[in-house]
Image: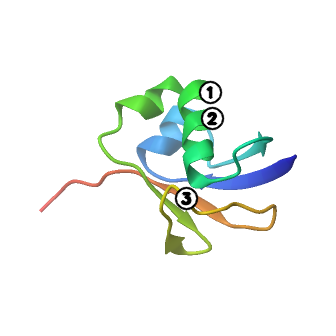
Amino acid sequence: MTSIKIKAFGITREIVGKRELVIEMNGDKTVSGLRKILDEKYPGMKGLKSLLIAVNNEYADDTTLLKDEDEIALIPPVSGG
């Protein structure tokens, strides 16, 4: 089992109800697996048009493997001009 510490920003912070959270991951320890867990646990995530996930200060794709010591950030869509 892998414990992933996540920092939530913007609307994602409102959806999860806090700035930081810890997710326990068993099977699929990729960004894709994390997205599935977040969608199940926090249905409001499904409504986001785009959600970038950064691993260790770099944007990650869905195949990126996650480890206990990784720093994860949820980066919601931004708007403005």
Cα separation, mark 2 vs mark 3, equals 15 Å
Label 1 secondary element: helix
Q: Amino acid at mark 3?
A: Thr
- The vertical placement of 65 against 50, above or below, is below
Q: Residue at x 21, y 54 (%)?
A: 79
| Residue labelled with disc 3 | 63
Q: Are marks 1 and 2 in contact (CB under 8 Å)?
A: yes
| Residue 41 percent coordinates (x, y) | 62, 27
Give the Cα separation between the discs numbered 1 and 3.
21 Å
Secondary structure, mark 3, is: loop
Local crowd size for mark 1, using a 10 Å CA cut-off: few (<14), some (14–19), many (≥20): few
Q: Nearer the viewer, mark 1 or mark 3?
A: 3
Residue farthest toward the left in the current orientation of the protein: 81
Residue 7 drawn at (x, y percent): 62, 55
Mark 1 to mark 2 CA distance (whole Å): 6 Å
- Residue denoted by label 1: 41
Q: Earlier in the sequence, mark 1 or mark 3?
A: 1
Could you classify mark 3 by the number of other residues whose Cα lies within 10 Å: few (under 14), some (14-19), or many (20 or more)? few
Q: Nearer the viewer, mark 1 or mark 2?
A: 2
Which element carries disc 2, helix, strand or loop?
helix
* Marking on residue 37: 2
Residue mark closest to the camera, 2 vs 3: 3
Q: Residue at x 50, y 55 (%)?
A: 62
36 or 28, nearer to the observer: 28
Residue 11: image location, x then y, percent:
42, 42
Name which quarter of the figure residue 37 lies in.
top right
Q: Which disc is residue 59 wearing?
A: none
